[in-house]
């Protein structure tokens, strides 16, 4: 049906004095003897449009139009509100498109986020999730624009794979057979399955991304990844979105520069395009959010060697829950101490022990560390993980053997090291964690439309 977006009416004066038609859902309703007010929202704006109903006019309004959650079509003249100079509509005709009964779940003005997670199909109608998903859209567009402007090729890597990128085995199995007693062993089971071998949902598009980079030079992927981790932390979901560039002829210092440029680009774009949402998140979820983001945009990130970070943590006058020793995998409390207490800005941690990192990372000359980096940010911890990739065939084979990995399923990956291998690097950005950082939302379940976690498939 023909109508005007509420965002356009609120943000420009071109409609003032003109008759328009708008559609939306009732967010609030106030009634009095001579006049009634409705706050209408159609999803195009965080802010609501006020509908003024003059009861002394000829307008006929159904009682259903005054109920929260009802959807309406309103025709009327756009005027200036004399109190705050915002645009509103003097209603001339109101049609109820969809009634909403008293058991509508959003009757309360404020509801706990935990409660809203139980109704993901309804929570998008709240101010919080209106803002979250608008920001998510803007950040996604900025990411694509960043890479497209720099000549990267957008690649769609497969979601069903026969190889485990991380070598950790935390994959969801893909099968058409399911539970069966008809097979004596795994070999017979998988031979009879759809693909004729064991397959799973991809934990990362990196390996296939490297394939593309070896012919196209600079590529990026942006899509879902799946991790079958039995984790219920505020930073983990089983299905999340991944931004993964892979760049040929790129070493670790080059990669760090690209990652920092990308972070600043997309944060700057968000701050420019979403001032209302940013103000909302600062008021409701994280005081000082704007200053934090400005600090990221206006300052150089720190680059700190893992060994130096361990020394800092061991000397810290803090009792950590998890002890710190060289060779340990840093926990969130360690990462946040480094970023929030020591450097007070994002930090690239580099040169991790090879024993705690993936097989594909380039081995440094010391024989103990790899050319890896994690970008740690205040409030979230790790947000980017990347490395220079091992380009030497023999060293890659040795790393796989050291971790007890089979070459089966990785033949294509090893071929890249045989046929014109080059220095190359890449990283992965957890998109939901980026949204958390930009909005101040503390739980990853609140920045994705349908969060998938252990025991939850709503």
Image (cartoon, rainbow, N blue to C red):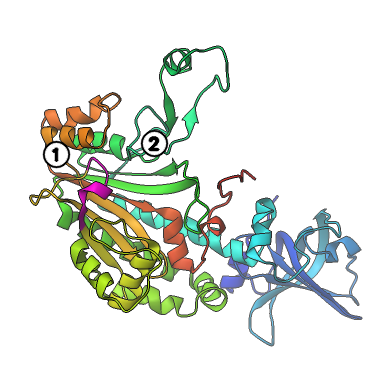
Is any part of residue 45 visible from this angle?
no
Instruction: Judge from the rendering whether residue 71 lies leftward or rightward of residue 145; answer left or right.
Output: right
Question: Local crowd at mark 2 within 10 Å, few (<14), some, or many (≥20)?
Answer: some
Q: Quadrant of the C terminus?
A: top right
Is any part of residue 422 visible from this angle?
yes
Q: Circle 1 sits on which residue?
A: 391
What's the residue at 20%, 66% (across, down)?
304
Horizontal and vertical percent position of residue 436: 47, 63
Q: Circle 2 sits on which residue?
A: 169
Horizontal and vertical percent position of residue 13: 59, 74
Q: Does residue 425 lie above or below 84 as drawn? A: above
Q: Which residues are magenta?
A: 351-360
Instruction: Judge from the rendering whether residue 358 lies leftward or rightward of residue 305; answer left or right.
Output: right
Q: Does residue 284 lie above or below 22 as drawn? A: below
Q: Is residue 208 magenta?
A: no
Q: Earlier in the sequence, mark 1 or mark 2?
A: 2
What's the residue at 40%, 19% (across, down)?
197
């Amino acid at each position: 049906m023909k109508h005007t977006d509420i965002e356009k009416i609120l943000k420009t004066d071109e409609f003032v004095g003109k008759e328009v038609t708008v559609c939306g859902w009732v967010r609030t309703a106030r009634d009095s003897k001579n006049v009634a007010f409705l706050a209408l929202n159609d999803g195009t704006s965080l802010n609501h449009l006020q509908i003024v109903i003059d009861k002394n006019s000829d307008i006929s309004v159904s009682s259903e139009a005054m109920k929260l959650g009802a959807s309406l079509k309103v025709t009327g003249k756009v005027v200036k509100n004399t109190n705050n100079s915002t645009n509103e509509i003097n209603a001339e005709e109101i049609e109820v498109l969809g009634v909403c009964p008293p058991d509508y779940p959003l009757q309360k003005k404020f509801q706990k986020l935990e409660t809203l997670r139980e109704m993901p199909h309804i929570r998008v109608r709240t101010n919080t999730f209106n803002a979250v998903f608008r920001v998510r859209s803007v950040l996604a567009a900025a990411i694509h624009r960043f890479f497209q402007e720099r000549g990267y090729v957008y690649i769609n890597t497969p979601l069903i794979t026969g190889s485990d990128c991380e070598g950790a085995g935390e994959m969801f199995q893909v099968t058409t057979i399911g539970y069966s007693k008809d097979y004596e062993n795994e070999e017979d089971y998988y031979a009879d399955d759809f693909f004729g071998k064991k397959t799973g949902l991809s934990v990362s598009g990196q390996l296939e991304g490297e394939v593309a980079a070896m012919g196209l030079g600079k590529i990026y992927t942006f899509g879902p990844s799946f991790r079958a981790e039995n984790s219920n932390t505020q930073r983990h979901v089983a299905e999340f979105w991944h931004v993964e560039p892979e760049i040929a002829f790129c070493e670790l210092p080059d990669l760090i520069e690209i990652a920092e440029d990308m972070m600043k680009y997309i944060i700057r774009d968000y701050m420019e395009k979403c001032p209302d949402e940013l103000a909302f998140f600062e008021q409701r979820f994280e005081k000082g959010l704007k200053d934090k983001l400005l600090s990221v945009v206006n300052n150089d990130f720190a680059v700190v060697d893992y060994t130096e970070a361990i020394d800092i943590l061991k000397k810290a006058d803090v009792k950590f829950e998890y002890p710190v020793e060289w060779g340990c995998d840093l926990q969130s409390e360690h990462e946040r101490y480094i970023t929030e207490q020591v450097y007070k800005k994002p930090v690239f941690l580099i040169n991790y022990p090879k024993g705690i990192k993936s097989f594909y990372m380039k081995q440094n000359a010391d024989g103990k560390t790899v050319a890896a980096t994690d970008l740690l940010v205040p409030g979230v911890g790790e947000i980017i993980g990347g490395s220079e990739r091992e380009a030497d065939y023999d060293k890659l084979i040795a790393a796989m053997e050291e971790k007890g990995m089979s070459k089966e399923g990785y033949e294509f990956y090893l071929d890249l090291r045989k046929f014109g291998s080059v220095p190359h690097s890449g990283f992965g950005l957890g998109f939901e964690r980026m949204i958390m950082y930009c909005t101040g939302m503390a739980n990853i379940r609140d920045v994705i439309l349908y969060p998938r976690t252990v025991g939850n498939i709503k």
